Structures are given as structure tokens and as C-alpha cells.
Image (tube, helix red, strand yellow):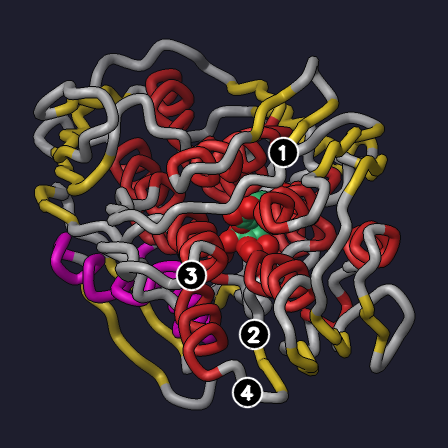
Amino acid sequence: MQYILNAPETINATIDLPASKSISNRALIINALAGNGIMPDNLSDCDDTEVILDALRDMPDTIDIKAAGTAMRFMTAYLAVTPGTHLLTGTERMKQRPIKVLVEALRYLGADISYEGNEGYPPLRINGKKLEGGSIEIPGNVSSQYISALLMVAPVMEKGLELKLTGDIISRPYIDLTLCTMIDFGAEAEWLGSDTIKVEPKPYSPRPYFIENDWSAASYWYEMLAINGNEESEIKLTGLTDGSRQGDSAVKYLFSMLGIKTIFETREPGVPTTVTLKRISMASDRLDYDFINQPDMVQTFVVCCCMMNRPFCFTGLSSLRIKETDRIEALKTEMRKLGYVIEETSPGELRWDGTRCEPEPGAAINTYEDHRMAMAFAPAAIKIPGLRINDPQVVSKSYPNFWLDLTRAGFAIGEEAGA
Ligand SMILES: O=C(O)C1=C[C@@H](OP(=O)(O)O)[C@@H](O)[C@H](O)C1
Ligand SMILES: C=C(OP(=O)(O)O)C(=O)O
């Protein structure tokens, strides 16, 4: 399927964002380890959360977590400490996303896990048991999801866990989000210095838990307003928290450099509220930023800066090659179709110096089974009327109502089958 997008002149909309998938997925795993008390409230309705919800409810012999990286990594650790034997698998792409660092760490701590396909990759056969825990060193520069997975199961290990992270630590806000969610459920866990985390062997306590909305999903609305450039446009986004623990809440600072102001309706710490996005006068004529802490925002900013004609240099992108797709290659290829030459100037660095090429007439953006390719490129329709997006249904991985919300904001969406 292919969507053909046309954008309105002005955007005036109130958007009910989906709940945070990162918080939903942590809350579900921790809640299960706490003995399945009351279900967390306002869980995300996205695919990546649904696969965990289904797995924890039914615990079938074969658990298919589809394309959800967090689900794969979190369920590996969860199943390793939970009695029973399961085969944990996912999509073809999931079978290419590395998991060796996590499997080796869990095995070192006493887990019984074997590879059913290629060494170092899913599918995994996991025979759950009580783990002893202890001290371990693991690389912090591949995926923070391995670290979050180990941390979440650490309170149920006999000796707890002391985790020393080696190398540059990537996606650190996601590790902090894990620790905060664990502490909310009664765990004792803390950083000992900048690279070591200690978790006490103290069980979780069940509790009611409300999940705030998703700052990563909010980024596409910031992007639309920034590209739209119309003084009369204004977007309201529901359920966001000021001082959120979601690392992607940094978009409120980043987009201020691209002319967007964020106004919180109320400012009670930790309480979700509606935010209004408005345009302010433009300040910077280029954007340079290290995305080591916000890897999921790179696609949003690459497309946005090109559409706004703002050259950029983005660093800290090493993890992008092992996400839903190789996001570095996907961005270079698809931006070229639109007439923008993006270069990988060194590993983990993407740069656009303003170089243009001949755009492909009637370009159709491929999404590579990556929700963020579809959502980051959709706002480009503001500058490129009739922009085509292939396989638009991929958005359900994190934001099932994205296209519906786009029509609510006044976009016209045509559909072509079989493209
Ligand atoms: O823990 C999480 O919820 C996530 C961690 C990040 O992954 P990496 O740590 O692999 O960068 C991020 O890209 C992903 O979308 C969600
Ligand atoms: C990278 C992502 O997800 P995951 O790694 O959990 O599949 C994402 O949502 O952008």
C-alpha cells in the first residue's frame, strides 16, 4: 500500500498522543515481576507494547515479539528469571539485530539460554530459573536495552546486581528511565559514579501506575509546525509531562532552535498536561547536535532540517545501523530521492552542507519496516505536495493512530493499493 499526502496551509489541531511505549514496556515487565498487581494505566496501544502484553498474559511455548527491540531484550531477561521453557523469536529483521551482549551477561549470571539460529542473534531458547546475580561488566556502547533488561530483573536475583558499563554509554536517558520506573515499584537501585549501577536484592511491590504520553511521537508534530512556517498554525499535544524522564522530551529544547516554543498548560512536576506548540522567530541558521542520548530523533531532525533548508552535522549515531533498519543508509537513500545529498562524513556522523541533487519526480519514500521512516518523512509533504509513502501501516509499531491524527490536522491522504 502507498499513501499520497497533501498538507493544509495552516495547521490547527489538538492531538491525543499515544502513551509512551518505553514506559509501557518497562511498567509491564516490572509489574509482572511484582506479581502482576493492578495493570498499569494508559498503556500504549502500539504493536511493541501489545506483544509484551500478550506474551505475559498467555506465556505460550513460542513467543513472537515481531519487530519490537525492547520486547526482545526485556523478555529475554524476564524469561531467564521466570520458571518455564520458551522459544523467543521475532521478524526477519529481529533475527539480524544483535543480542549477544545480553545473552552472555545473563549466562554469566547463571541463565540457561541457547541460540536456535545464528550465534549472537534471535531466536533464543530460554529455560528460566532463579539467578544468583553478582557483579558483571558489559559494554555500554551497543544498546542500552541490554542494560535496562538486566537492571529490571536484578531485584529478583539472589545477590542483586552490580553492573559496570564499559565504553561510551549510549542512550543513557533510557537507562535512567529504567532505574526510575524500578524505584517507583519499590526497588533499590542507584548509580555508583558515572559507569556503575548497583541494584539491591529487594523485591518489587505492586502499585497503581499511570503512564504519560510519548515524547518521541510528539516530535513529528514539532517537525510539522517547524516546516509549515505559518504564523497562524498552532498544535496542542495531550498528556505530556514537563520534566519527563523520557530522553526524547529534549525535543522541546531542540525545536526551540528551529523556531518552536513549547507552552505547558500546567506546570505541576510529574503531572501530564497539554502542551501548545507555537512558532517564534527563527534563531539558528544551522543545527549541530550529538544524538547519543536521543537516537530515535535523528530521522525527525534530518528531514526537518532539509525541509527548512538548515544545514546540519549530527553525531552520536552509531546505534542507528542496528535499529528497525539501517537508518543511516535509509536516510541517505530516501533524502536523495527528494533532492538532498546527506553524507556520512565519519562512522556515526551525518552531515548536510546544503548540497542538492535532481529530485526523483513523483518520489515514493520506502519505509523499510521502520515506523520512524514513515512518520519523519510524512511532514515533508508540507514542502512536497503529493509526497508518497510506501507501506504506511508500519507506524503501528509505536503510533497506530498517526495517519488518523494527520487527517485530523487537515492533511489529505490518498491511497494506492499494491504500490
Ligand atoms: O529502552 C528503550 O525503551 C529504548 C532504547 C533505545 O534503544 P538503544 O538503547 O538500542 O539505543 C531506543 O532507540 C529505543 O527506541 C527504545
Ligand atoms: C529503535 C526503536 O525501537 P526498538 O529498538 O525497541 O525496536 C524505535 O522505536 O525507534
Q: Position of residue 214 (x, y in %)?
A: 33, 45
Callout 4: 10 Å neighbours few (<14), some, many (20+)?
A: some
**Looking at the image, residue 99 lies above or below residue 203:** below
Placement of the N terminus among the 4 image quadrants: bottom left
Compare marks 4 and 3 and give the one earlier in the sequence: 3
> Which of 416/14 is in front?
14
* Proximity of marks 4 and 3: CB atoms separated by less than 8 Å: no
For badge 1, the amino acid type reads Val
Q: Position of residue 301 (x, y in %)?
A: 48, 35
For badge 4, the amino acid type reads Pro
Q: Is residue 233 visible?
A: yes
> Which of 257/41 is in front?
41
**Looking at the image, residue 298 lies above or below residue 196:** below
Per the image, the residue denoted by label 4 is: 60
Q: From the viewer's perspective, tell me whether residue 149 is left or right of residue 50.
A: right
Per the image, the residue denoted by label 3 is: 35
For badge 2, the amino acid type reads Ile
Determine the secondary structure under disc 1: strand
Whether ligand 1 has any atom under 8 Å from the Cβ at mark 1 is answered as no
Compare marks 2 and 1 and give the one earlier in the sequence: 2
